[in-house]
Amino acid sequence: MAEVRLRGIRKSYGPVQVFDNFALDIRDGELLCLLGPSGSGKSTLIRLIAGLEPLEAGSIFIGPRDVTALEPRHRHIGMTFQGYALYPHLSVRRNLSYPLQVRKIADAEIARRVTSTAAQLGIGHLLDRRIRQISGGEQQRVAIGRAIIQEPELYLLDEPISNLDASLRESVRGELRRLQQTLGATMVMVTHDQMDALAVADRIAVLQQGKLQQIGTPRDLYRRPANLFVARFIGRLRMNFLSGRVAEGEGGAPMLHGDGFSLALPVEIARRLDSARGEIVVGFRPEAVEILPTQVAGAISVVAAGELFHGEQTIELFDRGEEQVQAMLAVPLGLKRGSSAWLRPAPDALHFFDRETGERLADKDATREETR
């Protein structure tokens, strides 16, 4: 396997510039997810690494080799596309062996690799079936098998499980993670689905409009988002946000004052907000909220707006003026729509952002990267 280094990448499509002086390091043996909304540049980036798109400027290294000027077939990569790119009229065996036959690998070696790859993916019993005769999940395994069988230095997966229905996605995520760890492979996976990325990645690189917003472990991005974009984008449920200003309360205690609320701030947190100018944004996740029937210090007045039942969890919805706030609970409260309630976010679960720049305000743990 090999590390990947991108340096000074520039790429445009006509007047639209996708990347300008972009850089990224992908570690040897890791599964890195490129995550972002449509138009963020993630699929373009993986195609640049593969050599399927020409660079305007910059360099791409796979291991010690500068592959910038090499054709895709000379980059030692295996690639899986969103649509699988399989031959439906051929058998699973023929689909797996095809890339090796093109490279004129000996028949005995092809047979060995087909048997070994099929065993790794649990599709040995399907080798003589045609692609049109197997399920979508099985086709996905065959597509990954076509990449594995080439024994590449680098695996590139472009939305590999986006075509699967919800019932299959969870199991396929586990299989993909197990396979990557078994192979000790360097994999780069493109996805727009943050749950796929959070579940399988060693690290996630979040892109927006060709800019790297943050790179880190799933826990890093969830617990310490670098800016408002990442905070809004990461998490099955969106983070709640309020705007306010830091000021002194009674006895000089630091407070965050906003429209209809005042939150007490620990002194050590207030000291980290010295760099803020003007209003700041405080965020808190739905699972870090206590719902109270009466007003207490540090609580936020809201109005019950309904609930969403998710089986083992219930999402309580609240209105706060024109904003909506969510709280995640194990047991539904059965609040009547329109009734008053108060939310108290956990003080140690608050995230603070500069309203003007969107950047996270410095905290003492910002430089520590957690392990997966």
Image (cartoon, rainbow, N blue to C red):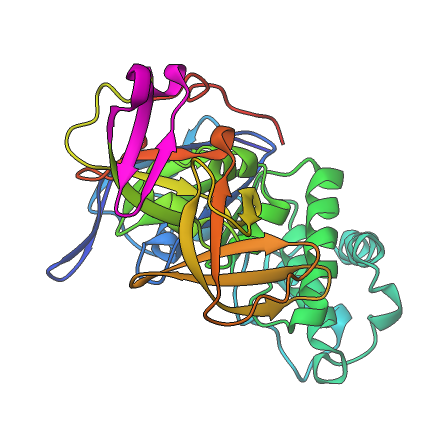
Q: Which part of the image, by quadrant, shows the C terminus?
A: top right
Q: Residue at x 76, y 84 (%)?
A: 133
**Above-or-below relation of 71 to 246:** below
Q: Where, by quadrant of the figure, is residue 23 drawn?
A: top left
Judging depth in this view, the residue of 206 and 55 nearest the camera is 206
Q: Which part of the image, by quadrant, shows the N terminus?
A: top right
Judging depth in this view, the residue of 224 and 154 nearest the camera is 224
The x and y percentages for residue 119 are 85, 55
The x and y percentages for residue 50 are 43, 50
Q: Residue furthest right?
A: 125
**Above-or-below relation of 213 to 157:** above
The x and y percentages for residue 125 are 89, 69
Q: Is residue 270 magenta?
A: yes
The x and y percentages for residue 260 are 30, 47
**Above-or-below relation of 312 to 210:** below
Q: Relative to 273, is 33 on the left or the right?
A: right
Residue 71 at least partly seen: no
Residue 245 at least partly seen: yes
Q: Relative to 255, is 287 on the left or the right?
A: right
Q: Relative to 231, is 81 on the left or the right?
A: right
Judging depth in this view, the residue of 119 and 82 nearest the camera is 82
In the image, the segment drawn in magenta is 246-271
**Above-or-below relation of 262 to 42:** above
Q: Residue at x 43, y 19 (%)?
A: 367
Q: Residue at x 40, y 44 (%)?
A: 231
